[in-house]
Image (cartoon, rainbow, N blue to C red):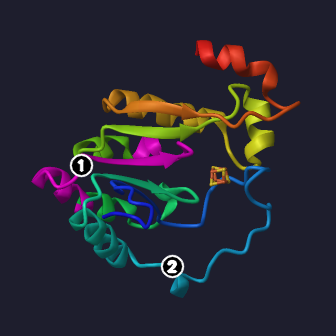
Amino acid sequence: MIDPFGRHISYLRVSVTDRCDFRCVYCMAEDMTFLPKAEVLTLEELDRLCSAFVRRGVRKLRLTGGEPLVRKNIMSLVRSLSRHLASGALDELTLTTNGSQLARHAAELAACGVRRVNVSLDSLDPAKFARITRWGRLEQVEGGLDAARAAGLGIKINAVALKGVNEDEFDDMVRW
Ligand code: SF4
Protein backbone atom coordinates (compact mmCIF):
# COMPACT_ATOMS: atom_id res chain seq x y z
CA MET A 1 0.00 0.00 0.00
CA ILE A 2 1.45 3.38 -1.03
CA ASP A 3 -0.01 6.73 0.01
CA PRO A 4 -0.33 9.77 -2.31
CA PHE A 5 3.15 10.92 -1.21
CA GLY A 6 4.77 7.67 -2.32
CA ARG A 7 5.28 6.34 1.20
CA HIS A 8 4.92 2.62 1.82
CA ILE A 9 2.40 2.09 4.60
CA SER A 10 3.22 -0.95 6.69
CA TYR A 11 1.98 0.12 10.14
CA LEU A 12 -1.66 0.50 11.08
CA ARG A 13 -3.20 1.63 14.35
CA VAL A 14 -6.80 0.65 14.86
CA SER A 15 -9.03 2.10 17.54
CA VAL A 16 -11.37 -0.69 18.63
CA THR A 17 -13.44 1.41 21.02
CA ASP A 18 -13.89 5.00 22.13
CA ARG A 19 -14.68 3.82 25.68
CA CYS A 20 -12.35 3.66 28.64
CA ASP A 21 -12.47 2.71 32.29
CA PHE A 22 -10.36 5.77 33.18
CA ARG A 23 -11.24 9.43 32.76
CA CYS A 24 -7.85 11.10 32.40
CA VAL A 25 -8.27 14.83 32.87
CA TYR A 26 -6.53 15.70 29.58
CA CYS A 27 -8.48 13.13 27.56
CA MET A 28 -12.10 12.80 28.66
CA ALA A 29 -14.77 14.58 30.61
CA GLU A 30 -15.95 12.67 33.63
CA ASP A 31 -19.43 12.40 32.21
CA MET A 32 -18.80 11.15 28.68
CA THR A 33 -21.19 10.40 25.88
CA PHE A 34 -19.76 7.63 23.74
CA LEU A 35 -20.62 6.68 20.20
CA PRO A 36 -23.78 4.64 19.80
CA LYS A 37 -22.96 0.96 19.22
CA ALA A 38 -24.41 1.10 15.72
CA GLU A 39 -21.70 3.57 14.70
CA VAL A 40 -18.82 1.39 15.89
CA LEU A 41 -17.50 -1.44 13.74
CA THR A 42 -18.28 -4.91 15.05
CA LEU A 43 -15.38 -7.19 15.95
CA GLU A 44 -16.03 -9.16 12.76
CA GLU A 45 -15.89 -5.95 10.71
CA LEU A 46 -12.68 -4.92 12.45
CA ASP A 47 -11.21 -8.30 11.60
CA ARG A 48 -12.18 -7.91 7.94
CA LEU A 49 -10.79 -4.38 7.83
CA CYS A 50 -7.48 -5.28 9.49
CA SER A 51 -7.13 -8.36 7.31
CA ALA A 52 -7.70 -6.26 4.18
CA PHE A 53 -4.88 -3.94 5.27
CA VAL A 54 -2.65 -6.94 5.98
CA ARG A 55 -3.34 -8.23 2.48
CA ARG A 56 -2.25 -4.82 1.18
CA GLY A 57 1.08 -4.89 2.94
CA VAL A 58 0.54 -3.80 6.54
CA ARG A 59 3.11 -5.74 8.62
CA LYS A 60 2.51 -4.21 12.03
CA LEU A 61 -0.86 -3.76 13.67
CA ARG A 62 -1.55 -1.87 16.89
CA LEU A 63 -4.90 -1.98 18.67
CA THR A 64 -5.82 1.15 20.62
CA GLY A 65 -8.89 2.80 22.11
CA GLY A 66 -10.10 4.47 24.31
CA GLU A 67 -8.97 1.42 26.22
CA PRO A 68 -8.90 -1.59 23.86
CA LEU A 69 -9.19 -4.21 26.61
CA VAL A 70 -12.55 -2.89 27.85
CA ARG A 71 -14.16 -3.75 24.51
CA LYS A 72 -16.40 -6.77 25.09
CA ASN A 73 -14.89 -9.98 23.64
CA ILE A 74 -11.82 -8.10 22.42
CA MET A 75 -9.75 -11.24 22.87
CA SER A 76 -11.76 -12.93 20.13
CA LEU A 77 -10.44 -10.25 17.73
CA VAL A 78 -6.88 -10.73 19.01
CA ARG A 79 -7.19 -14.50 18.64
CA SER A 80 -8.53 -14.10 15.14
CA LEU A 81 -5.89 -11.58 14.03
CA SER A 82 -3.14 -13.80 15.42
CA ARG A 83 -3.66 -16.06 12.42
CA HIS A 84 -1.78 -13.47 10.38
CA LEU A 85 1.19 -13.79 12.74
CA ALA A 86 1.08 -17.56 12.39
CA SER A 87 0.96 -17.34 8.59
CA GLY A 88 3.84 -14.86 8.48
CA ALA A 89 1.69 -12.17 6.82
CA LEU A 90 2.05 -9.95 9.89
CA ASP A 91 5.29 -9.22 11.80
CA GLU A 92 3.75 -7.72 14.89
CA LEU A 93 0.43 -7.46 16.68
CA THR A 94 0.50 -5.18 19.68
CA LEU A 95 -1.63 -2.80 21.70
CA THR A 96 -1.60 0.44 23.63
CA THR A 97 -3.40 0.10 26.93
CA ASN A 98 -3.87 1.82 30.27
CA GLY A 99 -2.98 -1.51 31.88
CA SER A 100 -6.11 -1.81 34.01
CA GLN A 101 -7.20 -5.08 32.40
CA LEU A 102 -3.78 -6.59 31.73
CA ALA A 103 -3.87 -8.86 34.75
CA ARG A 104 -6.82 -10.67 33.14
CA HIS A 105 -5.51 -10.73 29.60
CA ALA A 106 -1.69 -10.72 29.57
CA ALA A 107 -1.26 -14.49 29.43
CA GLU A 108 -3.70 -14.90 26.55
CA LEU A 109 -2.22 -11.95 24.69
CA ALA A 110 1.19 -13.63 24.90
CA ALA A 111 -0.31 -16.95 23.83
CA CYS A 112 -1.76 -15.21 20.77
CA GLY A 113 1.69 -14.03 19.73
CA VAL A 114 1.60 -10.49 21.13
CA ARG A 115 5.21 -9.76 22.14
CA ARG A 116 4.97 -6.30 23.67
CA VAL A 117 2.52 -3.68 24.87
CA ASN A 118 2.62 0.07 25.42
CA VAL A 119 1.20 1.05 28.79
CA SER A 120 0.14 4.63 29.53
CA LEU A 121 1.20 5.64 33.03
CA ASP A 122 1.66 9.24 34.10
CA SER A 123 2.58 8.90 37.77
CA LEU A 124 4.02 6.40 40.24
CA ASP A 125 2.30 8.18 43.11
CA PRO A 126 -1.05 6.48 43.86
CA ALA A 127 -2.84 9.68 44.89
CA LYS A 128 -1.58 11.63 41.91
CA PHE A 129 -2.35 8.76 39.58
CA ALA A 130 -5.93 8.76 40.89
CA ARG A 131 -6.17 12.54 40.40
CA ILE A 132 -4.95 12.34 36.80
CA THR A 133 -7.03 9.33 35.76
CA ARG A 134 -10.02 10.15 38.02
CA TRP A 135 -11.19 6.49 38.04
CA GLY A 136 -7.87 4.67 37.86
CA ARG A 137 -6.04 2.87 40.65
CA LEU A 138 -2.28 2.59 40.36
CA GLU A 139 -2.31 -0.73 42.21
CA GLN A 140 -4.48 -2.27 39.49
CA VAL A 141 -2.12 -1.10 36.75
CA GLU A 142 0.89 -2.38 38.69
CA GLY A 143 -0.85 -5.76 38.90
CA GLY A 144 -1.30 -5.61 35.13
CA LEU A 145 2.37 -4.79 34.60
CA ASP A 146 3.36 -7.72 36.82
CA ALA A 147 1.11 -10.03 34.81
CA ALA A 148 2.54 -8.74 31.55
CA ARG A 149 6.09 -9.31 32.75
CA ALA A 150 5.18 -12.79 34.01
CA ALA A 151 3.71 -13.59 30.59
CA GLY A 152 6.96 -12.52 28.94
CA LEU A 153 5.55 -9.40 27.28
CA GLY A 154 7.87 -6.49 26.60
CA ILE A 155 6.55 -3.28 28.14
CA LYS A 156 7.01 0.29 26.99
CA ILE A 157 5.70 3.00 29.29
CA ASN A 158 4.07 6.06 27.74
CA ALA A 159 3.93 9.01 30.14
CA VAL A 160 2.32 12.34 29.34
CA ALA A 161 4.49 15.15 30.68
CA LEU A 162 2.20 17.48 32.61
CA LYS A 163 3.56 20.80 33.79
CA GLY A 164 2.96 21.30 37.49
CA VAL A 165 1.51 17.80 37.83
CA ASN A 166 4.12 15.09 37.29
CA GLU A 167 7.21 17.05 36.25
CA ASP A 168 8.81 16.39 39.64
CA GLU A 169 8.60 12.65 38.96
CA PHE A 170 10.41 12.34 35.65
CA ASP A 171 13.77 11.35 37.15
CA ASP A 172 12.13 8.71 39.33
CA MET A 173 10.10 7.39 36.43
CA VAL A 174 13.15 7.12 34.20
CA ARG A 175 15.00 5.29 36.97
CA TRP A 176 12.01 3.00 37.45
S1 SF4 B 1 -6.50 5.78 29.77
FE1 SF4 B 1 -6.10 6.67 27.71
S2 SF4 B 1 -8.07 6.57 26.64
FE2 SF4 B 1 -8.49 6.26 28.81
S3 SF4 B 1 -9.05 8.30 29.58
FE3 SF4 B 1 -6.84 7.99 29.94
S4 SF4 B 1 -5.81 8.86 28.13
FE4 SF4 B 1 -7.99 8.58 27.61
Looking at the rendered image, the quarter that the N terminus falls into is bottom left
Q: Based on the displayed image, in which of its 4 quarters is residue 3 positioned?
A: bottom left
| Part of the protein shown in magenta | 80-104
Q: Is residue 155 left or right of residue 26?
A: left
Q: Position of residue 112 (x, y in %)?
A: 24, 49
Q: What mark, if any, has residue 112 been given in the picture?
A: 1
Question: Against 61, is 80 above or below?
Answer: below
* Horizontal and vertical percent position of residue 60: 32, 50
Left or right of 75? Residue 20 is: right
> What residue occupies the far bottom of the structure in this picture?
38
Q: Nearer the viewer, residue 4 or 84?
A: 4
Q: What's the residue at 71%, 20% (across, down)? A: 170
Taking the image as shown, residue 24 lies to the left or right of residue 155, namely right
Look at the numbered disc 1 and say if its residue's Cβ is closer than 8 Å to ligand 1: no
Residue 103 counted in the magenta span: yes
Q: Quadrant of residue 140?
A: top right
**Please, what is the three-letter code of the amino acid marked with disc 2?**
Val
- Circle 1: residue type: Cys
